[in-house]
Image: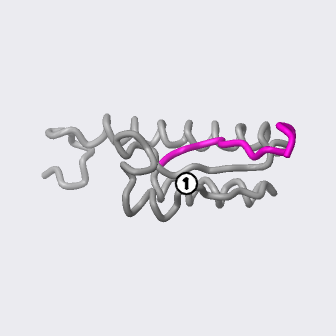
Amino acid sequence: MSARDEPVVVYAGTLVEVDILKSLLEVNGIRAFLQNESMGVLASWYVSPGGAQPIRVIVAREDADEARRVVAEFVSRQNESAGEEETSFVDGDESHPDSP
């Protein structure tokens, strides 16, 4: 197998993250595979140092550029959501649904 034919890792994360991303890639016509799917859940420290981001999303090299675009959009939306969660509904915030 030449370097041109080798698959490319485009993302590594948790099972939930990689499942969502794999679906997004497939919707965009990119075939994706998950590496360490079972071991990443059962013994994440075995496949990744410290157990961080144990499952990898792999695509064909020819799809890598388009896959990276989808990944970048996915990560951007994740960061936006995380930022909203961190800054919204602070104790004493009147917009909090549980505020009196």
Residue sitting at x 55%, y 39%? 75
Which stretch did the figure color magenta?
1-13
Q: Identify the image quadrant of residue 61.
A: top right
Name the kind of residue labelled 1 in the image: Val
The residue at the far front in this view is 1
Which is more toward the observer, 96 or 29? Answer: 29
Residue identified by numbered label 1: 18
95 in magenta:
no
Residue sitting at x 21%, y 42%? 94
5 in magenta:
yes
Disc 1, SS: helix
Which is more toward the observer, 97 or 74? Answer: 74
Which is more toward the observer, 41 or 98? Answer: 41
Side (left or right) of 49 relative to 61: left
Please tell me whether residue 80 is drawn above or below residue 17 in the rendered image.
Answer: above
Q: Position of residue 71 (x, y in %)?
A: 64, 42
Q: Position of residue 49 (x, y in %)?
A: 39, 39
Q: How many marks?
A: 1
